[in-house]
Amino acid sequence: MIKRCLYLEKLNKNFTPKLRLELTMMPIINNQELEQAENLKNNWKLKEALKILNNFDVNRNLTTHERFHYSFLKSSILFDLLSTKEALNYAELAYKESKELKSDYEIISSLMLKSRIFGSMLEPSNSLEVINEAEELLARNNQKSSHEFKMMKGYVLLRKGCCYFSWGDISHCLMFFCEASQLAKEINDKKLILQTTKWLSIIYSIKGESDRALEYKRRYLALAIELNDKQEIIGAYNSLGMELTEKGEIKQAIEHLERGLSLCYKINSWKTFLLISSLFDTYLKSNSLEKAQQCHDRMGELVKQGTFKFNELIYRLQEAALLKKDSREISQSKAEKIFKEVANKDTKFLEFQLYALINLCDLYLIRLKKSSNLKELDNVQPYIEKIRFIAENEELFSLLAEMHLIQAKLRLVTFEFKEAQELLTQALDIAHLHGLNLLTKRIEEEQTELSKNFLKWEKLRTSGGKISERMDLARVDEQIQILLQKRNYLKGISSS
């Protein structure tokens, strides 16, 4: 079962090329051709690197080390180029050759690579099983105080945290990331410190601890600049820009995103589309629709190049988001059509499907507020149920609690107070059980608010208050906006 945390933040997008753990545990290469290919890979010249490997004579008299390095490097490059099945085949070869070498370092490196590939193939159970094998191998190591052991242990913990992140288990993935961070600091491994800092910033965003998340994102940027890792610098600018957008600091957000985009153009980064997409979201949130349209046009040009399939889905969803901003009925209908296409599409890009479903809920609730026709609730209910089904099936606990919350608010709109209280209690139980502390606090505030407004609700019930008044008192719009905004955490992951 695919179990991913989206709110985790989009989508752990562990299944797209956008999300990768940039493990620095690359084996040392002595062969000149392989070294040249690795240098090209490190500079993101992946096709050039693959060309060298495709022309590499594997039938000549190679040492086991050279065969291992060839298989490992080719698997890594194919993984970055989205050829996951072929990448897995070479990762299996690398693992087999690492066992012949009887070197813990090479074995663990190949297991880490396999774990990443399984993660991208939506097989988190296999991903965790492989990383557990690496952890067991480390447990038998007699040099636990050595620098190399601690470095390997740190990366294993980091990868293990990502596996639990895929299941939406925030408490465990936070625990593993913190342990990895502690080890990274102990041995002063700057690359590992960067990775743990990045992931901790994502987790704190998911938990709603925006100030803490912002602090970690700034550390992430500083570390990326210190290491002169341009891809990570771009990711950090994007991550910071998105966090600032969420906080409403639009000017600063645009400055960071523009810096990241400028660097994208300079090095021809695969993250270019993502930065433009984040700029689009920022402009859309600030109602700068003309600039949002300009970003959308630039994205359209990149989509035509067909670099990554998921780009097309983002492009279509953002087209719908622009149309939704236009209050004309024809634009609203076009937006609805696109959202339905994505919502009903059989896709592995689950976060896009959820975003489309939430937008459909929003569209129908907007109509409900305008028309006061309670039949619109019949339209929205199947989409709410579908989101809940996904959240339960994928163990997306934050989303599940949020959906209980929106259902409670809709029960208030129809004056079903007892059912609303029960749904709030269920939401609180979910949030509390899974350590979602800020969400727990917000639900408790909702319960207090309901008690405080009881007389107002009774007055509306006896007077037959307007639907719009009921929705305002229940703050339905506010809850929908929370759900829509949480999609941005996904991009924070994917583009970093």
Image (cartoon, rainbow, N blue to C red):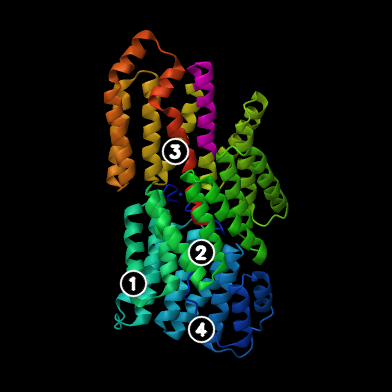
Above or below residue 230? Residue 261 is above
Mark pair 4, 1: CA separation: 22 Å
Residue in the foreground of this view, choosing between 408 and 345: 408
Q: Secondary structure at mark 3?
A: helix
Q: In the image, what residue type sits under mark 2?
A: Ile
Residue underneath mark 2 = 117
Earlier in the chain: of badge 2 and badge 1, it is: 2
Circle 4 residues within 10 Å: few <14, some 14–19, many ≥20: few
**Magenta-span inclusion, residue 327:** no
Is 103 displayed left or right of 259 in the figure? left
Residue underneath mark 3 = 482
Residue 344's disc is none
Q: In the image, what residue type sits under mark 4?
A: Ile
Q: Residue at x 47, y 35 (%)?
A: 481
Q: Which residue range is magenta in the image?
A: 356-376
Q: Residue at x 35, y 18 (%)?
A: 415
Earlier in the chain: of badge 4 and badge 1, it is: 4
Residue underneath mark 4 = 28
- Mark 3 vs mark 2, foreground winner is 3
- Mark 2 vs mark 4, foreground winner is 4
